[in-house]
Image (spheres, rainbow, N blue to C red):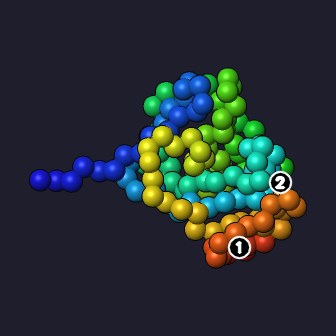
Amino acid sequence: MIAAEKKHEGSCLCGAVKFKVAGELGEMMNCHCTHCRKSHGAAFATYIEVPWSRFEFVKGKDHLTTFKTDSSTKRSFCKTCGSIVVCFADSDKTNLEISASVLDTPTDLKPAYDIYVRSKASWYDITGNRPQYKTNKGA
């Protein structure tokens, strides 16, 4: 018997946008950059890296609006409820990041590292022993 391929699903708060990811999810990370903090209205944003080749919008792709930051990062969010669904850069044709908060399928993933900690909220203390990077991982 052939094992079924893992499938992960997610949606925005109002359900207008839905997606699926075939196969395993990539690494999970916390981003503390100013753009992520402000767009998520939180101390940081948690993302999961996923190959574009295994990601598919099931419903509502046309219901997304995309905001491009001055650093050329793009965040696509639902026009109705404002949920940030994906984050990506045109320069990376291989991977995108899905907001962990819109994942509907349970996962055992935990954040592997924190990035852009130089911009973290002054009122938030990062806890745990995860690697921390002042800018991006490897930079």
Q: Check disc 2 and report its element: helix, strand or loop.
A: helix
The answer to which of 89 and 48 lies nearer the viewer is 48
Residue 137 in sight in this render: no
Disc on the earlier residue, 2 or 1: 2
Occupied quadrant, residue 17: top right
Occupied quadrant, residue 39: top right
The residue type indicated by label 1 comes to Gln
Does the CB distance between marks 2 and 1 fall below 8 Å?
Answer: no
Residue 29 in sight in this render: yes
Q: Which residue is mark 2?
A: 34
Identify which residue is drawn at 50% across, 49% down: 52
Give the side of residue 107 with respect to residue 73, left or right: left
The answer to which of 74 and 108 lies nearer the viewer is 108
Q: CA distance from mark 2 to mark 1?
A: 16 Å
Vertical placement of 101 versus 113: above or below? above
Vertical placement of 119 versus 2: above or below? below
Identify which residue is drawn at 65% across, 30% down: 78
Q: Which residue is mark 1?
A: 132
Give the side of residue 20 with respect to residue 82, left or right: left
The residue type indicated by label 2 comes to Thr
Task: Looking at this view, name the residue that lies furthest to the right.
Answer: 122
**Residue 36 x %, y %:** 75, 50
Image quadrant holding the C terminus, namely: bottom right
Mark on residue 17?
Answer: none
- Looking at the image, how many numbered discs can be counted on the residues? 2
Identify which residue is drawn at 83% across, 54% down: 34
The answer to which of 122 and 62 lies nearer the viewer is 122
**Residue 114 x %, y %:** 68, 66
Task: Looking at this view, name the residue that lies furthest to the left.
Answer: 1
Give the side of residue 53 with respect to residue 38, left or right: left
**Residue 61 x %, y %:** 56, 29
Q: Check disc 1 and report its element: helix, strand or loop.
A: loop
